């Protein structure tokens, strides 16, 4: 052990490399764990998670949920429960008797709500006697000052406060104000108890144990789409986490390999002095475990700090893509430490095994001199990995299997690269003119370098493959979204009005209303959107494959078109019927006329004729507007001022720009993680070549002795590194494209239920490759610049 | 003609100069062997002649070239153009095969002629090994490759630092015979630093390095 300590003092870089590699790996693990934990406890993006709780306590059907049950559970310490009544009966305007369509009422125990951010409506404290009802501003305008009645003719409190964070179809009030002489708990029993904060498994178990037999803890179905997306986000994050883990694994193994390589001579001397192989191996393993546990503790702290820094960015992604909020939960350091330590100890023990075995072989004298069947082993492993990758790709029908196929493809790629790299380098060497001996040496020694830095090259290859794959995927998505936006946003203006526009437009202005509603198909929530019977709208819908929609039948309501997400979720295709239950209870069953692409929309959506959803439409008023001779833009705005007061007018270009800006924001986290992975791989490569540089210094000294100048030598070394990176990049290119295909056609297909065409922009591809090589070369300039130009004849003796 | 005049070299923290006003001359095409105890300054002397380092004082000249005054760039050029080196540990470029190693210096200098390289390989008995990776060769074969490399670019001077130090007696005799014969045939000056008396005896003139001075034997 003392010798190990002394060796650490002599070659601190090798231990530092291992330390850094473990710190990076464990901080990555902690970050992924914390982010995923937060993602599991996401909240709908309305600052009012209680509206759509993830968990609810509800009656199992035999007996109703009572106030006593509620009080009993709260007294038992479950303060995260808030009672609510979801009134789904009709609501009437007191004066007119008319019914505002699509409105529902939620009465909740506001005193039990745990937190109220600034934008959240401030519910009336109990001391304040005036009852209130809250609604979205648009809904509030619809109700105005009118009083609403429930089906028993009991009036609801007058609307006083509006909050943008509430859903448009929902009115919210305090449960104490809901119950009156006529609205009793007997008539309107509690619908459930909403769990208003996170509910860890241990807490779930405790709650289940406490519940009387007539109550059950249910995972709510009301946030189905959000929950699915949370899982999808977790999936993609785990994908990146796994990617980083694979890269870090290579880095740690590489670091270990280098460390043991440096120690071999000393350990051999110790062996000659009579110290047993087992003692030496045990000392090295114990040292590694010590290093691992120390580094993982540092990594844990770093991971926590980084997660806290990243939280706003992740939140932005959640808000943009998932329409939910990311919550960074309170951190339990002991739990986190035990996870990190256990993972590190496990991984260190597993990955130390191979280098230790090699060390043991070398120490017992069985290693050197005997030709290792490494190539045969590599060929066998590569064939096996390629076959497995192919098989899992063909058979993958779920996100988990898609990720497994990606991991196998990456590993198969490293095998193929390691097999082909020597042949490519030899081929390259043949094309170097005889008059360029130094270039010839650079390429020839690159082959050696590639063997010595094999693991670091693998890490770089994986990072680069992932970078290419992600870049092409994001760009394909960008292009698909852009063309989709170009096709879908066809009108020059769009109007979001608080109330229906009833006034007929003047000549030259045409107004098309886009109705919105929701329905249930096979227990799954589906968005409904009307599509006007106009060729401009119908041709803007990108049906894939082209054609197939019988638009006259669509206009009569016989047919509908569905988005890819819905089609993939339920394996629907054109010609199938689509039975749905609308909000007002009516059933429709149009025939699917075609499937359209709907990038960026996580929800299932159906486009159909307006008459089918008129009765159950949401109180949302969206219009597409064209204007032309004789009307001018001034005429349009003037008309809108009185026809749609309070309405917001968007021009199509601004809308497209806004959408694309949101798109770019969505990939901020992914892009950053990508670059971090690449930088980590670059760092590992740099330390590897810096360490190996000590071994190759004799060769370089020899070249100096043969008359090669220091500058040329540095350039040659940089060419070596560059060639290695370039060839790794060339090999990474096809695998990056394959990865992109897998991400789109497997991960996106099964996690997000959409696919889009892979579009390869050669300029962007080259940019990604050159940027990656550029980053690597910038990092590798350091060891190249540190090359000692001084000549020492004695140095060449160690050759 | 290689001439060293009053060359002095002292390393920091050492009480005495390792080379002290040393004088030496070697006519073109002649050979010299230098012997001496370990630490006497033999390798330092070669280092100064090769232009790896500069003397504290004195002059080193090879024909018209003033080696002791050359800057780094000129020293690099000198080594490329005029110098061949043979090392104790062979010091071959292990990523190359025999042919690439042998022709490397000639290609670097720009006077590569395949026929001459083939002839050298033939004379050194390496014709059959030309495409073999050097790592697969025996010590004697590797040193013969090193000799071929040192001569392939037709240098004016060859410096050999313990060229037989890693070889057995029989192989050492064979290798040194090759070295001296080829230098003689190509009219190349040769300076050999060695502990081996039988190798030293092959040189035109034998020297002993003692107390920083060369003494003729």
Image: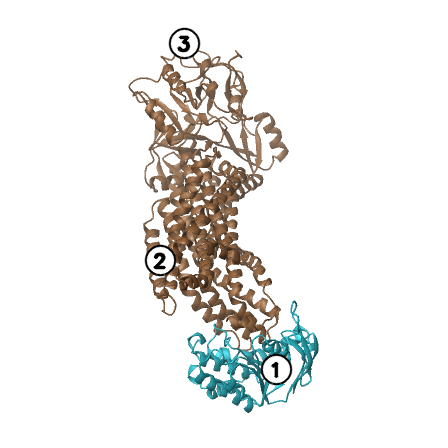
Chain colours: A brown, B cyan
Is mark 1 in CB contact (under 8 Å) with mark 2? no
Q: Position of residue A658 (x, y in %)?
A: 56, 39
Q: Secondary structure at mark 3?
A: loop
Is mark 2 in CB contact (under 8 Å) with mark 3? no
Q: Secondary structure at mark 1?
A: helix
Mark 2 or mark 3, which has the lower sequence index?
3
Q: Nearer the viewer, residue B201 or A660?
A: B201
**Alpha carbon separation for disc pair 2 and 3:** 71 Å
Q: Residues within 10 Å of mark 1 (few under 14, many from 20)?
A: many
Looking at the image, residue B46 lies above or below residue A596? below
Looking at the image, residue B110 lies above or below residue A738? below
Q: Residues within 10 Å of mark 2 (few under 14, many from 20)?
A: many
**Alpha carbon separation for disc pair 1 and 2:** 54 Å
Q: Chain of mark 2?
A: A
In the picture of the structure, the residue carrying the numbered disc 2 is A386
In the picture of the structure, the residue carrying the numbered disc 1 is B82
**Alpha carbon separation for disc pair 1 and 3:** 113 Å
Asked if residue A220 shows in the view, the reply is no
Mark 1 or mark 3, whichever is nearer to me:
1
In the picture of the structure, the residue carrying the numbered disc 3 is A182
Q: Position of residue A160 (x, y in %)?
A: 54, 17
Give the image quarter of residue A55.
top left
**What residue is at 49 percent from the left and 72 percent from the top?**
A429
Is mark 1 in CB contact (under 8 Å) with mark 3? no
Q: Nearer the viewer, residue A478 or A679?
A: A679
Mark 1 or mark 2, whichever is nearer to me:
1
Q: Position of residue A562 (x, y in %)?
A: 39, 39
Q: Position of residue A571 (x, y in %)?
A: 33, 41
């Amino acid at each position: 052990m003392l010798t190990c300590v002394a060796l650490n003092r002599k070659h601190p870089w090798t231990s530092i490399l291992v330390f850094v590699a473990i710190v990076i790996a464990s901080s990555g693990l902690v970050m992924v764990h914390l982010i995923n934990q937060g993602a599991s406890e996401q909240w709908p993006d309305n600052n009012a998670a209680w509206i759509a709780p993830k968990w609810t306590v509800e009656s199992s059907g035999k007996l109703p949920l009572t106030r006593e049950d509620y009080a009993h559970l709260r007294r038992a310490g479950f303060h995260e429960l808030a009672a609510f009544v979801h009134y789904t009966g009709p609501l009437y305007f007191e004066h007119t008797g008319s019914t505002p369509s699509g409105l529902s009422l939620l009465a909740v125990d506001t005193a039990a709500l745990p937190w109220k951010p600034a934008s959240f409506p401030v519910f009336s404290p109990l001391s304040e006697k005036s009852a209130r009802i809250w609604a979205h501003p648009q809904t509030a305008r619809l109700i105005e000052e009118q009083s609403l009645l429930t089906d028993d003719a009991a009036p609801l409190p007058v609307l006083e406060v509006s909050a943008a964070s509430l859903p448009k179809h929902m009115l919210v009030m305090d449960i104490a104000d809901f119950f009156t002489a006529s609205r009793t708990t007997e008539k309107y029993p509690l619908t459930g108890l909403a769990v208003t904060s996170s509910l860890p498994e241990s807490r779930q178990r405790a709650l289940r144990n406490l519940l009387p037999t007539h109550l059950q803890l249910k995972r709510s179905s009301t946030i189905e789409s959000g929950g699915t997306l949370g899982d999808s986000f977790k999936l993609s994050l785990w994908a990146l986490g796994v990617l980083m883990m694979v890269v870090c694994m290579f880095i740690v193994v590489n670091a270990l390999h280098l460390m043991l390589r440096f120690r071999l001579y000393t350990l051999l001397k110790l062996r000659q002095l009579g110290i047993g192989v087992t003692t030496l191996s045990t000392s090295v393993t114990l040292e590694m475990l010590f290093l691992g546990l120390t580094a993982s503790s540092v990594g844990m702290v770093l991971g926590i700090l980084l997660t806290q820094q990243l939280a706003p960015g992740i939140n932005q992604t959640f808000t943009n893509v998932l329409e939910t909020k990311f919550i960074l939960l309170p951190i339990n350091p002991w739990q986190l430490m035990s996870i990190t330590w256990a993972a590190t100890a496990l991984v260190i023990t597993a990955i130390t095994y191979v280098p230790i075995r090699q060390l043991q072989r070398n120490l017992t004298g069985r290693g050197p001199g005997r030709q290792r069947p490494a190539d045969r082993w590599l060929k066998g492993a590569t064939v096996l990995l390629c076959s497995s990758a192919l098989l899992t790709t063909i058979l993958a029908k779920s996100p988990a299997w898609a990720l497994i196929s990606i991991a196998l493809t990456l590993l198969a790629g490293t095998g193929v690269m390691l097999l082909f790299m020597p042949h490519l380098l030899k081929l390259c060497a043949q094309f170097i003119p005889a008059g360029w001996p130094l270039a010839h040496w650079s390429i020839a020694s690159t082959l050696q370098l590639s063997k010595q830095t094999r693991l670091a090259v693998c890490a770089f290859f994986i990072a680069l493959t992932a970078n290419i794959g992600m870049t092409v995927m994001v760009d394909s998505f960008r292009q698909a979204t852009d063309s989709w936006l170009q096709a879908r946003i066809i009108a020059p203006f769009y109007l979001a009005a608080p109330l229906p526009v009833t006034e007929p437009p003047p000549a030259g202005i045409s107004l098309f209303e886009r109705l919105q509603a929701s329905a249930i198909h096979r227990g799954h929530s589906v968005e409904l959107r009307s599509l006007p019977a106009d060729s401009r709208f119908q041709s803007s819908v990108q049906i894939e494959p082209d054609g197939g929609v019988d638009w006259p039948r669509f206009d009569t309501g016989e047919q509908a078109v569905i988005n890819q997400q819905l089609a993939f979720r339920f394996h629907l295709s054109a010609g199938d019927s689509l039975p749905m239950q609308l909000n007002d209870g009516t059933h429709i069953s149009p025939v699917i006329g075609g499937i359209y692409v709907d990038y960026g929309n996580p929800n299932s959506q159906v486009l159909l004729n307006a008459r089918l959803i008129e009765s159950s439409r949401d109180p949302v008023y969206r219009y597409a507007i064209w204007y032309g001779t004789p009307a001018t833009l001034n005429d349009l705005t003037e008309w809108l001022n009185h026809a749609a007061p309070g309405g917001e007018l968007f021009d199509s270009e601004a809308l497209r720009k806004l959408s694309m800006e949101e798109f770019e924001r969505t990939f901020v986290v992914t892009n950053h993680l990508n670059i971090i992975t690449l930088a980590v791989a670059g760092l590992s490569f740099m330390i590897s070549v810096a360490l190996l540089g000590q071994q190759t210094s004799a060769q370089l000294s020899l070249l100096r002795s043969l008359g090669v100048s220091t500058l040329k030598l540095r350039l040659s070394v940089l060419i070596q590194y560059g060639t290695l990176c370039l060839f790794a990049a060339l090999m990474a290119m096809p695998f990056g494209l394959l990865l992109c295909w897998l991400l789109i056609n497997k991960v996106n297909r099964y996690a997000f239920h959409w696919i889009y065409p892979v579009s390869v922009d050669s300029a962007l591809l080259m940019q990604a490759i050159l940027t990656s090589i550029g980053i690597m070369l910038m990092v590798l300039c350091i060891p190249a610049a540190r090359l000692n130009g001084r000549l020492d004849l004695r140095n060449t003796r160690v050759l | 003609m290689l001439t060293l005049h009053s060359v002095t070299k002292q390393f920091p923290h050492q009480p005495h100069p390792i080379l002290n006003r040393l004088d030496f001359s070697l006519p073109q095409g002649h050979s010299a062997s230098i012997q001496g105890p370990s630490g006497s300054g033999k390798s330092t002397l070669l280092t100064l002649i090769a232009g790896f380092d500069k003397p504290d004082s004195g002059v080193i000249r090879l024909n018209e070239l003033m080696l002791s005054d050359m800057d780094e760039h000129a020293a690099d050029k000198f080594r490329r153009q005029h110098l061949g080196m043979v090392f104790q540990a062979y010091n071959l470029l292990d990523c190359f095969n025999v042919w690439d190693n042998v022709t490397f210096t000639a290609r670097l200098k720009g006077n590569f002629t395949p026929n001459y390289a083939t002839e050298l390989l033939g004379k050194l008995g390496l014709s059959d090994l030309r495409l073999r990776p050097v790592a697969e060769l025996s010590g004697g074969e590797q040193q013969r490759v090193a000799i071929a490399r040192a001569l392939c670019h037709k240098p004016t001077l060859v410096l050999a630092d313990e060229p037989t130090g890693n070889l057995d007696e029989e192989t050492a005799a064979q290798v040194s015979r090759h070295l001296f014969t080829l230098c003689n045939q190509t009219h190349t000056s040769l300076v050999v630093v060695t502990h081996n008396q039988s190798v030293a005896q092959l040189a035109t003139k034998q020297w002993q390095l003692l107390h920083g001075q060369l003494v003729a034997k």
